[in-house]
Image (cartoon, rainbow, N blue to C red):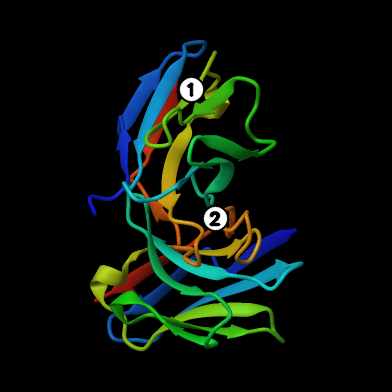
Amino acid sequence: DTGVSQNPRHKITKRGQNVTFRCDPISEHNRLYWYRQTLGQGPEFLTYFQNEAQLEKSRLLSDRFSAERPKGSFSTLEIQRTEQGDSAMYLCASSRWGAGENSPLHFGNGTRLTVT
Amino acid sequence: AQSVTQLGSHVSVSEGALVLLRCNYSSSVPPYLFWYVQYPNQGLQLLLKYTSAATLVKGINGFEAEFKKSETSFHLTKPSAHMSDAAEYFCAVSGDAGGTSYGKLTFGQGTILTVHP
């Protein structure tokens, strides 16, 4: 169990640029989640996948945000035309769900995005 | 719909003293409840979880929490604080106990625990 891996750890970008983050979940986990955490707040749910299917998206996920998990393994989160309000820590988590086993979420160390 | 309220954004204790971090929840379904800890610039680490079994849940690092349905509370305690316990703690409720939204967590705003020598 190598844990959930997120890259990059930090990203500084200028307003209007596009950014992409990657998450590698724990290998046997079939669910993958994205959360966003702003300073002084708890994480907020953005979206989640079961295998390659995106099952739910939060209203927080504007049209500028898109997430994929093409082969049911790693996932990417892309933000187009970044705004200063997108500055936050983006957390990825994974879990194993189903067949009588619902594990809790295991979180990665996050990608901190700063939009200047 | 679910919500979580953590009473006290900052709690300060002396090393060796009792730690009590308060969490109240609101849920339209029987809840699954969690406590996570976050160290600076890191992700969240699970401390313990309540999933409708025993109401007193023991977790890692000597922490425990008691589910009280009548009070809609899930307070986190530790008998004796250690310097290494200094971190931010988050209470969370599952979006759908055991169901398809199991991992869709609603978090409280967090409590920063400071431990003085």
> Which quadrant of the figure has residue B107?
bottom right
Image point (52%, 49%), residue name? A43
Q: On the picture, is A108 further left or further right than A67?
A: left
Instruction: Choose between B3 and B82: the one closer to the eye.
Output: B3
- Could you give the CA–CA distance between mark 1 and mark 2, rounded to whole angstroms? 21 Å
On the rendered image, what quadrant is the N terminus of chain A found in? bottom left
Label 2: how many Cα within 10 Å (few below 14, some 14–19, many 20+): many
Task: Name the chain letter of the residue that bears numbered label 2.
Answer: B
Q: On the picture, is B6 further left or further right than B58?
A: right
Label 1: how many Cα within 10 Å (few below 14, some 14–19, many 20+): some
Question: How many marks on residues?
Answer: 2
Q: Are marks 1 and 2 on the same chain?
A: no
Name the spot of residue B25 as percent of width and height, x first.
66, 70
Image point (56%, 70%), residue name? B33
Mark 1, secondary structure of its residue: strand
Image point (64%, 73%), residue name? B24
Q: Amino acid at mark 1?
A: Glu
User: What residue sits right under mark 1 in the picture?
Assistant: A78
> Which quadrant of the figure has residue B45?
bottom left
Q: Is residue A113 above or below residue A25?
A: above
On the rendered image, what quadrant is the C terminus of chain A found in? top left
Name the spot of residue B101 as percent of width and height, x first.
62, 54
User: What residue sits right under mark 2 in the picture?
Assistant: B103
Q: Amino acid at mark 2?
A: Gly
